[in-house]
Amino acid sequence: MDKPAPRNLAVVWTVAFTNFATPFMFSGVGITLPSMGRELAMGGATLGLFENLYLGTAAALVLPFGRLGDAGDKNSLFTGALALFAASTLALAFLPSVPAFLFVRTVQGVSIAMVTATNMAILTESVSRERLGQAIGLSIGAVYMGLSAGPFVAGVITTALGWRWVYVLSAAVTTCALILAWRSLPCRWKIPRLEFDWPGALTSVGGVGLLVVGSGLAARSAAGWALAGFGAVLLVVFVAVELRVGSPLVPVPALRSNPELLRAFVVQFLTYAGGMGTSFLFSLHLQEARGWTAGEAGRLLMLSPVLMASLAPLGGRLADRVRPQFVATVGVVLVCSGTVAAFLVAGSGSMVLIVTTLVCHGLGFALFSSPNMAVIMRSAPRERTAIASALAAQMRSMGMVFAMLVITFFLARHVGEAGLGEETREGLRTAMRLSLGTISLLALCALVTSLPDLRAGKSRIAD
């Protein structure tokens, strides 16, 4: 098989390095929050808002930016996003007030939405179809590597130099990605000429944003549940709007007429909903039921992301050699097996089952993520690659948000506002069992939905 041209190889490494830098920043922030809270007098609710503003903004704006990327120049949008992310990250190292922090964190969410909407589209247009799976695998492996390295590096730097230096380092890493993008991606921005779907954009942004922010607040107040519910209603309105406008953000009728492609998006949602809540629950279980320290629990829970980072490129290469739907379905089988094992943990507390879950999820997501993304991106015509990338990211985010909503509901019902301890241990065990039972059903739905994807076929997104 021919090797990619030098410029195309540079594009692959640029996207991969970017996909390392931005999750590195995101995962490292969690380590800085206690120190930041003490210095700036941030309470728990404010610290939660600090993260929810970022996640909500990024998830809410990805579809509009995907449409803009298809209509304009993806390279310009991607490079501009990196510049904005680097500048805002560096600003966080020097800001003195809480309102300024919240505003700049929101700006970071805007920049990440721009990156997420364009990164896979840029890969798809720069790499041959025969090597696309390998390129996506390398890129997704970099994401997991950033998620794995961020907490460790941030912990060392926060202890040795202080939490503000974590943002200085993250800005430096992002600047390196910006330099790579500037050198390898020719930017020719053009004024988009399109009939923009403002009703769809507003209902999408409002629905996703309220769902993400509401899920983060649901554990603390009924207002969070109200926001999440209103967000879900707006998403239903969004689908209805898309069926009626002339130039929609998402071509819903075209998706309905291409069952293989629609199935890939649905499986994306269900697989992340059915596999991404277990680490959070295991962290509670190991520290509250077994008495482990946070460091001990963290080191064990790194097993899954390390396996994902190591093996995601292998999943991408396999997608180039055999039918990617088959590889993705094997990944779903492993994710489903791991989640069922996690459900059994809630009843037995077996360390063997905990390790089994972490290994199955690490292997499963490594085999699922790249091939399923390859199916989606190979199916998208050139003029729709950014919206396909954005919609795939949206499904991934919504799956994780839905899983956390399930967990939050059962924790609120059986643990409540009381602090974790001996008196809430039985309630925590009940909440964990019910949460993992529900998530296991979602994982089984992902498996059942993915099975028809084993047959060959070609899907397209049409205007």
Image (spheres, rainbow, N blue to C red):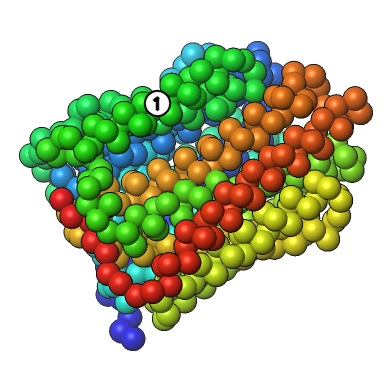
Tell which of 56 and 222 is nearer to you.
Answer: 222
Q: Tell me if residue 112 comes above or below residue 75 in the rendering.
A: above
Residue 121 placed where, x, y %?
29, 55
What's the residue at 40%, 58% (across, down)? 264
The percent position of residue 176, horizontal first and vertical second, equals: 42, 50
Q: Position of residue 196 (x, y in %)?
A: 15, 34
Residue at mark 1: 233
Q: Is residue 224 left or right of residue 83?
A: right
* 296 with respect to 319 (left or right): right
Q: Residue at x 33, y 51 (%)?
A: 389
Is residue 133 visible to the viewer in this orientation of the structure?
yes
Q: Furthest-left residue in view? A: 193
* Residue 346 percent across, percent down from the top left: 80, 46
Position of 434 relative to 459 (above/below): above
Pointer 1 local density, CA inside 10 Å: few below 14, some 14–19, many at least 20: some
Which residue is located at x 67 percent, y 54 percent? 339
Q: Quadrant location of the N terminus?
A: bottom left
The residue lying at 34 percent from left, 55 percent from top is 262
The type of residue carrying mark 1 is Val
Nearer to us in this view, 17 or 244: 244
Question: Which secondary structure lies at badge 1?
Answer: helix
> Could you tell me if residue 12 is visible in this image?
no
Compared with residue 339, is residue 45 higher up or lower down, i.e. above or below? above
Pick the front one: 38 or 212 = 212
